[in-house]
Image: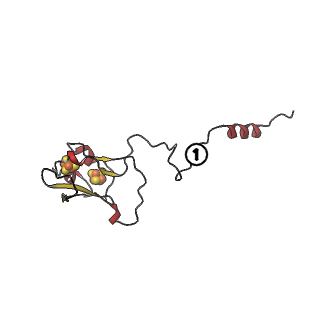
Amino acid sequence: MPRLGKMQKELLKSAQSKAATVIYPFTKEGLNIPKGLRGRWTYAEPEKCTGCKICERVCPSGAIEMIECRPEDFKTKTGFRPICHFDRCVLCNQCAESCPRNVIRLDAEFEMAFLSRDDMVIY
Ligand code: SF4
Ligand code: SF4
């Protein structure tokens, strides 16, 4: 039986080992999403929001706007709630860290392509 050369050995090894890449974007399975990734801005727990406006005040890029609670919203104490103009957000996490009620989060959603700026207003 012929002896295998270095190259053939390497090829055999690669053929038998697990793929090093994943077939994203067809599936997210196997993606190594780092813990604590700052992704999409989320008004995660509206029922805890008091409408205090701290998040709006601390945002360095003016991305947060306080709007009057709409009929479909949870009604906060002040009657206002934050929305995010995500096109201005720099993902600094300041709003989430400053919110006394842990209402806001930058979640692990990293697919953030939008077709228009209007689509980037997150309620
Ligand atoms: S999200 Fe937090 S900081 Fe912002 S208004 Fe609500 S409670 Fe206040
Ligand atoms: S993450 Fe930073 S820039 Fe984005 S909305 Fe919060 S405070 Fe503003």
Determine crowd level at label 1: few under 14, some 14-19, many 20+ residues with C-alpha closer than 10 A.
few
Relative depth, front residue between 90 and 46: 46
- Amino acid on which disc 1 is placed: Thr
* Residue sitting at x 24%, y 53%: 59
Q: Residue at x 40, y 62 (%)?
A: 114
Q: Is residue 7 left or right of residue 24?
A: right
Return the x and y of residue 64 as percentages of the image width and height.
Answer: 24, 56
- Residue 117 lies in quadrant: bottom left
Identified at 36% across, 52% down, the residue is 40
- The residue that disc 1 covers is 21
Q: Residue furthest right?
A: 1
Left/right placement of residue 86 relative to residue 111 reads left
Q: Residue at x 19, y 59 (%)?
A: 71
- Quadrant where the image shows the C terminus: bottom left
The figure's colour scheme reads secondary structure
x, y percentage for residue 51?
Answer: 16, 51
Under tag 1, what secondary structure? loop
Horizontal side, residue 3 vs residue 19: left or right: right
Ligand 2: does it lie within 8 Å of the C-beta at label 1?
Answer: no
Instruction: Indicate whether 115 appears above or below 55.
Output: below
Q: Which quadrant, please, contains the N terminus?
A: top right
Return the x and y of residue 74 as percentages of the image width and height. 20, 52
